Amino acid sequence: EAAVTQSPRNKVTVTGGNVTLSCRQTNSHNYMYWYRQDTGHGLRLIHYSYGAGNLQIGDVPDGYKATRTTQEDFFLLLELASPSQTSLYFCASSDWGGGEQYFGPGTRLTVL
Amino acid sequence: GQQVQQSPASLVLQEGENAELQCNFSSTATRLQWFYQHPGGRLVSLFYNPSGTKHTGRLTSTTVTNERRGSLHISSSQTTDSGTYFCAIDNNNRIFFGDGTQLVVKP
């Protein structure tokens, strides 16, 4: 089974703060994804990547940057955090674009 | 537009009852995946089911792609089944999630 880890698991920051969320997958999957989940809703895609150095825009990209530094590592960056970005963030990976997705444990971010 | 619609939005069962969760999608999706989200937030993949019927324990996933629908059947529900169930479909190499069905199983 694919292993996807995220750090930190919980993060509190203030409005205007800088936040970096990290994701690592160890199954050599090509695709990696960042989602956010707000209370009572499904997941919404922020950014995704199909390989090191690649970045694709998702459905809710505003206010987020992302970088895929290696096959294993995908980072989500909030450079000027706002309270509207308080959410549960999930990273996922898949072998190909339509393949089965494996999720990390999530990072709960609170922006005060 | 809304790619994936799940029903019901919420469901309350007595332990031992069965449940049928529905997923309808608007695009010509090629794959459907069911997830369970623990009350604490962790997501677990239940089924990756492009078409047909798959079984795991008390769970059955059925996908009818040409009718753009899928279902998840839970038999003999247990209190530990409580949580939120999501279906997701892929379209053009991207995954779209429904808003989930929140299930509560009472003892």
Image (cartoon, helix red, strand yellow):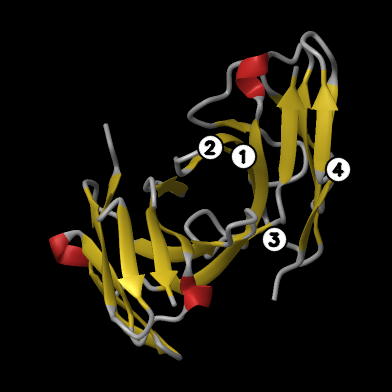
Q: Are marks 2 and 1 in contact (CB under 8 Å)?
A: yes
Q: Is residue A28 above or below residue B55?
A: above
| Residue for badge 1 | A48
Answer yes or no: are tags 4 and 2 on the same subunit.
Answer: yes
- Return the chain for callout 1: A
Q: Which mark is residue A29?
A: 3
SS label for mark 2: strand
Query: Where residue B86 appears, x then y in whole percent?
Result: 42, 57
Q: Is residue B103 above or below residue B1?
A: below
Query: Where residue B34 appears, x then y in whole percent?
Result: 43, 65
Dot 1 alpha-carbon crowd within 10 angstroms: few under 14, some 14 to 19, many 20 or more: many
| Residue for badge 2 | A45
SS label for mark 1: strand
Separation (CA) of disc 4 from disc 3 = 22 Å
- Return the chain for callout 4: A
| Residue for badge 4 | A8
Quadrant (top left, top right, bottom left, bottom right) of the N terminus of chain B: top left
Q: Are marks 4 and 2 in contact (CB under 8 Å)?
A: no
Q: Is residue A87 left or right of residue B98?
A: right
Separation (CA) of disc 2 from disc 1 = 8 Å
- Return the chain for callout 3: A
Q: Identify the amino acid type marked 1.
A: Tyr
Quadrant (top left, top right, bottom left, bottom right) of the C terminus of chain B: bottom left
- Return the chain for callout 2: A
The numbered mark, 3 or 1, whose residue comes first in the sequence reads 3
SS label for mark 3: loop
